[in-house]
Image (tube, coloured by chain):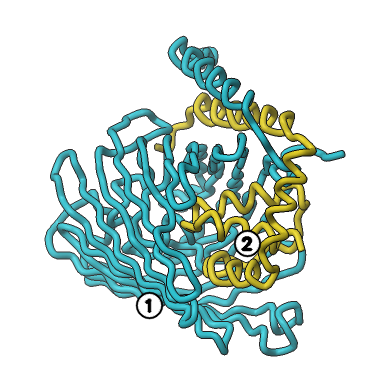
């Protein structure tokens, strides 16, 4: 295990960056409007509750970050913390007050 | 004189990478993203010291995380560790060094339905709470993992294969989430995994802020043994206290840990000089039923008490210090640990 193989980390980073590049290039204004409309249906207080009861169980909230990555954070938390789609949307609402 | 072979990409790896890129390309053609789904780079960088029985090891560490959503249903994520360890050689011969670079996980998550996600790739094994939730260097209160952590993690803490996970029920009174996995065997130097299966179910009561969970794991190669685990977490409403505990029972050993941390945010708020302090206490025991040098637990019954004091500096910097006394029939030791960790989180590239 202590031996270093540089190939796999390199390939992983390459794949992630490529996926990232593709995903970003495909953003559309219509999709943004749709997402904003969806988030506004959930009260901010509910988003705060979901954040405090799930994310804060393990870690402190980040001090600040770009709103451009709030959807990515919410999706990551959905997978990692076992959240439902509704809770993911609530967290997204909380991260974009 | 030693000769270093040139770094050549094996043909198989190139083929697989091309195949993966083609699949990603096909997926990306149908994406529908909001502006909030920019890929991100996160993680932690830290400097760690560990003095065990009078010998000090220094370990600078970088642990980056990449998160890249594709379309409405897909997320690629990966985490790696890069560290250099400086440790004392025996017989006053100075310090030696060792280097480690490894992938912790590299997985794709497909959101099949509001309550079901399919995970594929090299993923963290969902057993207990430490491996998936508390292990990152920017989260853990103590530098050392609990002694019992390795039980149920099938050797490396990661599996190679598929996993179903999600939230079964969620309302204001109760939340139940689950994870079930199957892992195949892999002997690759960077992707080490055992043939195994298992899973975890958590019940969370939001009003009581109480979580109870059970875990199961079965090794499907070599000894074909079962491992069982349970955990209990509680965060009282009135106080900024977190109480976490876990128990695991393997074929040859068992053990538990209880951790209590108290952020002093009641004294002038979480951002005040005193409010940034967080005393932490952990008590743990392991019990050896029969010898097994592969489960990662101490060879003899062991008790350990950790006293920690963490300080949350502004700008995502954290200093953790701790003292532990470990009692065992083989040896009693004092363990001093300090670390300074910076947590970073930013978009993968500059926006407009």
Q: Measured along the vertical axis of the image, is residue B301 above or below residue B340?
A: below
Determine the image quadrant of residue B72: top right
Q: Is residue B305 left or right of residue B289?
A: right
Give the residue drawn at x 35%, y 41%.
B159
From the image, tell me which residue sits under label 1: B283
Residue A94, given in percent of the width and then of the height, sits at 69, 64
Q: Nearer the viewer, residue B6 or B287?
A: B287
Using the image, name the chain to which the residue with label 2 belongs: A
From the image, tell me which residue sits under label 2: A90
> Is label 1 in a helix, a strand or a loop?
strand
**Letter of the chain shown yellow in the rendering:** A
Residue B149, given in percent of the width and then of the height, sits at 35, 60
Residue A41, given in percent of the width and then of the height, sits at 68, 61
Using the image, name the chain to which the residue with label 1 belongs: B
Give the residue drawn at x 15%, y 40%.
B222
Report whether residue B244 is seen: no
**Letter of the chain shown cyan in the rendering:** B
Give the residue drawn at x 26%, y 68%.
B255
Q: Nearer the viewer, mark 1 or mark 2?
A: 2
Report whether residue B78 is seen: yes
Mark 1 nearby-residue class (10 Å; few <14, some 14–19, many ≥20) = some
């Amino acid at each position: 295990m202590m031996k270093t193989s540089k190939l796999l980390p390199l390939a992983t980073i390459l794949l992630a960056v490529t996926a990232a590049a593709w995903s970003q290039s495909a953003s559309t204004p219509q999709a943004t409007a749709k997402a904003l409309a969806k988030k506004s249906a959930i009260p901010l207080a509910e988003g705060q509750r979901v954040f405090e009861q799930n994310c804060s169980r393990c870690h402190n909230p980040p001090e600040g970050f770009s709103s451009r990555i709030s959807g990515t954070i919410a999706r990551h938390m959905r997978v990692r913390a076992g959240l439902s789609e509704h809770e993911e949307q609530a967290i997204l609402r909380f991260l974009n007050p | 004189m030693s000769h270093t072979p040139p770094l050549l990409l094996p043909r198989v790896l190139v083929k697989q990478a091309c195949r993966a890129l083609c699949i990603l390309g096909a997926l990306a053609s149908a994406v529908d993203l909001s502006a909030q789904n920019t890929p991100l780079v996160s993680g932690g960088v830290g400097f760690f010291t560990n003095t065990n029985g009078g010998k000090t090891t220094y370990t600078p560490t970088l642990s980056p995380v990449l998160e890249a959503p594709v379309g409405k249903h897909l997320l690629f994520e990966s985490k790696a560790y890069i560290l250099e360890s400086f440790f004392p050689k025996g017989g006053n011969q100075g310090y030696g060094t060792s280097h480690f670079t490894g992938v912790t996980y590299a997985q794709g998550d497909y959101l099949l339905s509001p309550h079901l996600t399919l995970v594929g790739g090299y993923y963290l094994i969902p057993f207990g709470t430490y491996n998936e939730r508390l292990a990152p260097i920017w989260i853990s209160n103590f530098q050392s993992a609990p002694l019992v952590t390795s039980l149920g993690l099938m050797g490396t803490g990661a599996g190679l294969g598929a996993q179903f996970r999600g939230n079964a029920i969620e309302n204001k009174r109760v939340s139940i989430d689950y994870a079930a996995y199957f892992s195949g065997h892999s002997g690759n130097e960077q992707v080490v995994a055992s043939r195994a299966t298992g899973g975890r179910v958590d019940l969370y009561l939001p009003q009581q802020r109480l979580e109870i969970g059970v875990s199961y794991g079965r090794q499907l190669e070599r000894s074909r043994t079962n491992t069982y685990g349970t955990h209990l977490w509680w965060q009282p409403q009135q106080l900024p206290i977190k109480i976490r505990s876990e128990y695991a029972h393997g074929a040859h050993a068992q053990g538990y840990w209880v951790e209590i941390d108290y952020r002093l945010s009641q004294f002038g708020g979480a951002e005040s000089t005193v409010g940034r302090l967080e005393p932490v206490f952990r008590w743990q025991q392991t019990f050896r039923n029969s010898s097994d040098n592969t489960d990662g637990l101490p060879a003899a019954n062991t008790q350990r008490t950790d006293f920690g004091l963490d300080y949350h500096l502004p700008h995502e910097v954290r200093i953790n210090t701790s003292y532990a006394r470990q009692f065992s029939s083989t040896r009693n030791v004092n363990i001093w640990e300090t670390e300074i960790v910076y947590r970073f989180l930013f978009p993968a590239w500059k926006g407009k």
